[in-house]
Image (spheres, rainbow, N blue to C red):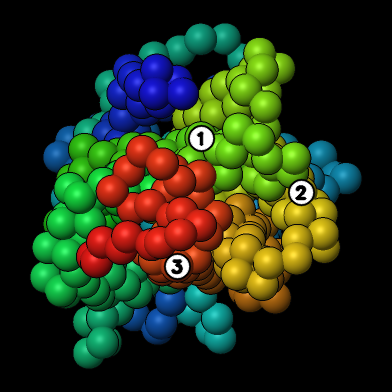
Amino acid sequence: MGGLRLLAVALTCCWWPPGSQGKTLRGSFSSATARDAQGQSIGHFEFHGDHALLCVRINNIAVAVGKEAKLYLFQAQEWLKLQEGGLEYSCSEKLSKAQLTMAMNQTEHNLTVSQTPHPQKWHVFYADKYTCREGGEESQGEDIPFEMMLLNPDAEGNPFDHFSAGESGLHEFFFLLVLVYFVIACIYAQSLWQAIKKGGPMHMVLKVLTTALLLQAGSAFANYIHFSSYSKDGIGVPFMGSLAEFFDIASQIQMLYLLLSLCMGWTIVRMKKSQSRPLQWDSTPASTGIAVFMVITQSILLLWEQFEETSSHNHHSHHSLAGILLIILRICLALSLGCGLYQIITVERSTLKREFYITFAKGCIMWFLCHPGLACISIIFDDYQRDKVITIGVILCQSVAMVILYRLFLSHSLYWEVSSLSSVTLPLTISSGHKTRSHF
């Protein structure tokens, strides 16, 4: 399993998508692209408030005027109707249905977008006089370089906020999360390090669990750096955004590795003469194959999801096929683990062991089911809030699950009762005649 972990992390490092653009967009308006697609898609943004702003700067005014260059803004719902409606619209008819139009005949253009009563997503397209022309090839002139900023009003009503309605609040959330991690580290880091150094029955579990926690903290810190920069320029630090996603994926792999290892009897209940083996799979090629398959499958799905998602801020969303398959995988893992633990709990006579298994089940099931559960709950929210609800909810629920598992494995009496590693070879020992205790 150690080699499997290294393989999964190496795969993640080598196969990683580039960071996504922010809401300060740079590129070129292309007549050829606009003609082929009946309008060049520039981007989309969730505007809110009454003073949202689209600002675009171009340098080659003469070419823009000669092409009769324009920007067309469609509300997301209206654009969806045009794309999926039963009626076939011509190129010019589609463009005529834009809610807002802006002719580009100056170096800098500002367009105010008023939103009532709720935030809405808008799609921005470029088109010119060549876009809807039919017939043979003709000279379409050179491309027009541009820089576009999409801005929402800040707390004072000024259009300086680079965050869309669906991203608002994430910067503050990650700041508070990093602050909480820092405070917890100051309080508990030394005692946790001493517990790991002393060894004991929970030694390997604590090492893997702490690695997963450090990866989660690293993801939060990288996200905070990215969002701090993003709030100033609308671009952020794409590398830090990708690094945050990498840390999150590595943490997911670590936790799956930990839980599968526990279920395979890596740590819990290694009793050679035990007739019942709770939380243990026989170490056979079949069980090892299942573990390998599950870890590699989750790794591939997590990476696949990153390539399909267009926004670097929504790495917990579930819009793609890979995201849906991940949710199904997590539900199956939770059901499988829950059924196994239920069978153990119903026949277990020891109150202490039952308490251990129930607590263990709570932590594991919360880890696996928080994403599917929040995906279902998010349906009651508006579209622009759903990804944010899932992202924040998953991080908080998985943090709570980690706390539950930490309390469980640091509970001296509970883990002692269940773990076979406390039986003979370690400083923590139990015998029929006496008990030797080490205090953490």
Compute the Cα span from label 1 to label 2: 16 Å
For disc 2, the marked residue is 340
Q: Residue at x 51, y 10 (%)?
A: 137
Q: Residue at x 57, y 9 (%)?
A: 136
- State left or right for residue 301 relative to residue 68: right
Residue 119 location, x and y as percent?
A: 51, 75
Q: Reply above or below: 213 against 207.
A: below
Query: Badge 2 local density, few (<14 within 10 Å), some, or many (20+)?
Result: some
In the image, what residue type sits under mark 1? Trp
Compute the Cα span from label 3 to label 2: 23 Å
Q: Residue at x 76, y 49 (%)?
A: 340
In the image, what residue type sits under mark 3? Ser
- State left or right for residue 242 relative to residue 429: left
- State left or right for residue 151 relative to residue 38: left
Compute the Cα span from label 3 to label 1: 19 Å
For disc 1, the marked residue is 266
Q: Reply above or below: 16 against 21.
A: above
The earlier-in-sequence mark between 3 and 2 is: 2
In which image quadrant can residue 413 be found?
bottom left
Q: Note whether residue 192 is visible.
A: yes
The earlier-in-sequence mark between 1 and 2 is: 1
Q: Residue at x 62, y 63 (%)?
A: 353
For disc 3, the marked residue is 413
In the image, what residue type sits under mark 2? Gly
The earlier-in-sequence mark between 3 and 1 is: 1
